[in-house]
Image (cartoon, rainbow, N blue to C red):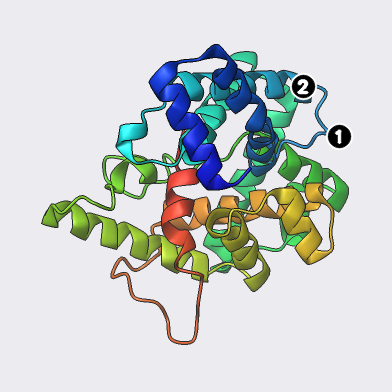
Amino acid sequence: MTEREDTALIQRYAASRDPALREAIILRYVPLVHYVLGRLGVLRQASAEYEDLVSAGLLGLIDAVDRFDTARGTRFSTYAALRIRGQVLDYLRSQDWLPRGARQRARAAQQAVNTLWAELGRAPTEQEIASHMELDLAKLRQALTDASHMILSLDEAGVTEEEASLHEMLPDEDQLDPAEALMEKELQGRLIEALEALPQREQQILALYYHEGLTMKEIGVVFGVSESRICQIHAAAVMTLRAILQEKAIPSNGRMREGRSPHPGAVRSLSQEVGRP
């Protein structure tokens, strides 16, 4: 079924509220649930609760079908993905599914990255982080996997005096208020500078994830590594971004250093996706 046919199906349901059409739409978009879980780094083979998360995502999909307003001009797939994501995150928060020890390891890894960034003035390597934490590389990578499961956020990264989230501080693209537009430019400039400080591989992974919309599994194929390894690298990259922003060591003029290209198209997506609580 083409996108045009999908749109026609949804419009017919919006007009008729036919239960048969509702079921057809839900069945049509079930793969979107698995896609969203992949985007969140939830690995089917690594999570005993994967089917429970699928069920939570399906509730989000059903809610999207029932609430979608065709008059808003938004693509249903975009709206549904947000509802699915929100439902899955609500489930994870309610279940507190990560063991306390895993959370402690993830937080210890974040603190190590913060300390090493302040000392080195650059993104620390995994070996440096492991040495600082007095762990072997395998245990560090497990901590990074734990961190990826915590759905890392740039919230409370100290990017403003009010400690508001980056997601909340960036206005809608249609917002024309000059003061808010200036604030958006400044925050995007800070995030661009933070991205520039990452190794090229991490920049590429973040761009593929936040700008190109690839799942962790798809990115793993691109780099020839496992899905879990991409989750680890992604978690380490986000930890480094948080460390940079917390350190407030980034110029806020929004200018990029000559010869560097951190995929500016990913900036807004990164600030919105990673900045959500």
Q: Quadrant of residue 186?
A: bottom left
Amino acid type for the residue under numbered disc 1? Gln
Structural crowding at the residue carrying mark 1, measured as other residues with C-alpha within 10 Å and reported as few (<14), some (14–19) or many (≥20): few
27 and 270: which is toward the camera: 27
Residue 223 appears anywhere in the view: yes
Q: Quadrant of residue 181?
A: bottom left
Residue 229 appears left or right of 250: right
| Of pointers 2 and 1, the one earlier in the residue sequence | 1
Kindly identify which residue carries mark 2: 51
The residue positioned 49% from the left and 87% from the top of the image is 259
Structural crowding at the residue carrying mark 2, measured as other residues with C-alpha within 10 Å and reported as few (<14), some (14–19) or many (≥20): few
As drawn, 267 above or below 112: below
Kindly identify which residue carries mark 1: 45
**Dot 1 lies on which element?**
loop
Amino acid type for the residue under numbered disc 2? Glu
Q: Quadrant of residue 139?
A: top right
